[in-house]
Amino acid sequence: MTRRQRRWGGGLAASVFLAAVGVFDGNGALLLAAAIPLAYVAADAISDVTVPDAISITRHVDPTPAPPGRPVTVLLTVRNDSERTVPDLRVVDGVPADLAVVDGTPRGGTSLAPGEDLTVEYAVAARRGTYEFEPVQLRARGFGAGTVETTRRVSDGDRRLVCRLDADAPPIDEYGDARPGRLESDAAGAGVTFHSTREYYAGDPAERINWRHYAKRGDLATTNYERTVAATTVLVIDARIRNRVVAGPGRPTAVELGTYAATHALTDLLRRGHDVGVVVLGLDGPGPAGLYWLPPAGSRQQRAQALELFRAANDAAGRPPNESAQVRRVIELLPPGGQLLTFSPVLDDRAVDAVETWRAADVPVVVLSPDIVPENTVSGQYVQVRRRTRLARCQRVGARTVDWRRGTPLPAVLAEAFAADARLASTRRRGRATGGDGR
Amino acid sequence: MTIPIPLLDRSSAVGDEGRPRAASLAVASFVVALLVVAGGFAIGQPDLLLSLGSVTGLAGAGLALLDRERFVHLLAGHCLFVWFGAPLSLLVVFAPLAGRVGIAVDGFALALFGLAMTWGNAGTRTHLSDGLSASTLTFAAAILWLVGFAAVAVGLAIAELSVEALVGQSSAAGGLASLFVVAAYAGAGIAVAIRWLPIRQLTPRSRRPAVERRVAAVRRYALGTIAVAVLSLLAISLIRASGGFERLEGTVPAAGFSALSSPFVVWLAVTVGTVGILAGAVALTLRRLARDSDPASAERLAAVIAGFVLAVAAVVAAALVAVSPLVGVMTLLAVLAAPLALVVCVAILVLAIDIGVLPDRASGAAVAAFGLVISAVGFARISVPLTFACVAVALLVWDLSSFGFGVTAELGRIPETRRLELVHAVVGVGVTVAVVVALTAVDTFRTSVFAGVGGTVPAVVACLGALALLGTLRG
């Protein structure tokens, strides 16, 4: 589409003014000056423009598929393959309406000589789903900038952004092993890490006989190893309507972030041989008390079924008949010795009430809380203070909390949390060792 | 090191709805600066750019700061806009009376102020409305300050006469009465100061209870002093009526009582009372003006402070009348008329935007172009090439500014667009130079070859033809 811009109305007024003053003053120079705007209008009129057909556009999206909340870099390259210069070319990429640009801008403009290219780089925040990019809008002007042609072109390269919960959580088969869990227990037994030695009993496996002890002392002893056992963990998704909120336009909801973190945890736990179950709170599901419920198991099908449940947590609507009943029912559903790993933004007191209820039943609870509260306003800072107070309340009743701050990649958060946990565990072990010496 | 001044070029100032991108505006400003320097040399004012540019730049910066929320920025905006905008307006209004040179300078001042407005993204109706409000408030505040100064001067004169009447009483009754009158006045001054000064608010929280106890004690003493003084005055009246003081005449106590009305005692007490009342009144006024519940209080306070300086300038000008009547009267009139001229000029700009003569966002660029056209009229009898250059640069400024506005509106402030803007600027400057050279050649040809052959009629005909062609081309 080509159109002309009317920019010289003021120039016409200046001409009339100068002509009038020139006649009134009898000044030929002013009369001549009245003709000056003509030069500019003429320059506009003779500069024609078209967007060349030989303009190639390539888009590169990285990474795709991406997990929710991850900034995805989009690189748009516009190259002038024609034989003539485009003095004024402006480009706007067709960013999907549901995605928010979080860094850079999808717009650019320059003067493109033959063979030159323009690169536009920006980042969008990924949200769960598949998003098609619109055609790229090109707008060209001539040297005089009076004529404008606008067109839309479909780009080469990537044309969609795919965001999946399990985008950076690979299938278990690729990395998993056959060991029965990685949770260390106080009991000694079979394993790989040395624990202690004891007197040999008939029937002990030959590979556990301590031959060095036999060489020194002449009697048989059996080596004990630190026994690893499988844990039973239930992932709790807080998918209430209250939590379907975003930090800004085009950002993932707290439930999306929670299910993404749960996908990570699910993959990791299954890979380490633990039994994992899933329960979704806050929806009216087909399970007991309106829950979406997947019993703990360690089978290969467990991951696929759990991912299906995570999708349901994001897509399903409706309210539960009784939220408190759902919280209490989780305790009944949890197998003996099981623990809860809760994913909640903790935006209200009900989340804390649930943790307190579970802790009152002596259930181990870990809370991973995605932070979706923007702190650039006073009200946002107030909400953030209240959220952190709730996390502190969770800690006070004995739950472990992990605050997943905005902009921090989940693996970094988990690594930091596990590192802190390892330090604590090491401190605990040292404490135990000191106490043992005393006894 | 960070310079502790408010920045004009905030991100919001160059956002999607902000000013033109920098490269376009920089080229336009550079060309205008060259033109002003050339014009200054032509009229014998080589430092014209420096003198006009500093005043217009500071006034434009003040206008840009008027939409800020922080009080310090608002105060800087009011002070800069009114202190520098007022003399600028006076120049704009009265310079054409000085002939062709005045018109040329007038146009340059408008052009530079228009560019300053554009740089500060202050060319919108909202900004100009803020400017109108600020200039009106400051002018009103200056008038109120002058009225206040006059009232204080009259009050001081009356007070001095009253105090002179109290000083030096020869009788014992007169001496005692003087003492109690000035004591009551001093007590009232202290009570007023304690009531209105923000002593509690300015005290650190940890020391507030102790300070509050002390303030309460001082208030009790002050009120007690007033009560005792009033009762004593009544008692003195009764004793004097009963002739009690006549028995003291000529005694040592009578001499002592009369000494109580000595200038040292009376003036000391009067000074204490006056300082207390004035301090309390100023504190009360400032607190009322800066009341948090009123969002416009910061603007009013800034206007009051800016107006104070104008009022002081008027007082100094009035004092000059005694030294040099002509200079003093002219200065006083200028000081009083300049803020009014600013109000009128800004009101005209707002009105021009409202009726559609000036474009809303691009009014700065339009004012700059208009100013250069005015300068062209001024230079018509001084320098023909400068006349052509003024008109051509006016169109160039409009071209580059509107182009820069378009880039800002379409691409926002983030992308790098310098090359795009420079290509357009180079083309525009090229057209400008070509036009000036061509028309100068035509004019030389006209005045040399056809000198005495024809008058302005052929030029009028040519001009009408050009206008018809212009109208046709722009559709």
Image (spheres, rainbow, N blue to C red):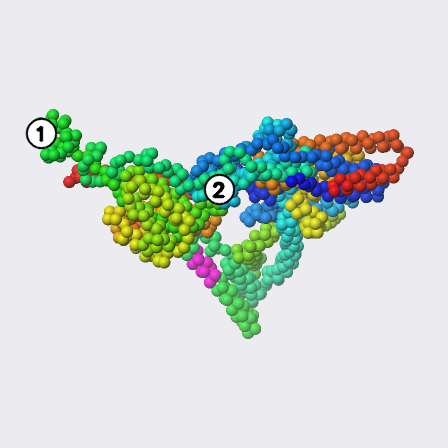
Which chain is home to disc 2?
A
The picture quadrant where one finds residue A408 is top left
Q: What numbered label is drawn on residue A219?
A: 1
User: Going by the image, does A233 lie left or right of A12?
Assistant: left
User: Going by the image, does B391 lie left or right of B451?
Assistant: left
Q: Which residues are magenta?
A: B210-221
* Residue drawn where x is 82% and y is 41% of the image: B464
Between the residue at mark 2 and the residue at mark 1, the CA separation in whole angstroms equals: 71 Å
Main SS of residues in magenta = helix
Q: How many marks?
A: 2
Specify the amino acid type for callout 2: Tyr
The picture quadrant where one finds residue A353 is bottom left
* Residue drawn where x is 56% and y is 38% of the image: A136
Residue closest to the eye, A392 or B339: A392
The local secondary structure at tag 2 comes to strand
The local secondary structure at tag 1 comes to loop
Residue B384 visible to an observer of this rendering? yes
Q: Position of residue A164 (x, y in %)?
A: 42, 41
- Residue topped by disc 2: A131
Circles 2, 1 touching at the beta carbon (< 8 Å): no
Residue closest to the eye, A170 or B122: A170
Q: Does residue A22 belong to the magenta stretch? A: no
Q: Position of residue A78 (x, y in %)?
A: 57, 32
Q: Position of residue B257 (x, y in %)?
A: 54, 63
Which chain is home to disc 1?
A
Q: Residue furthest bottom?
A: B242
Q: Residue furthest front?
A: A301
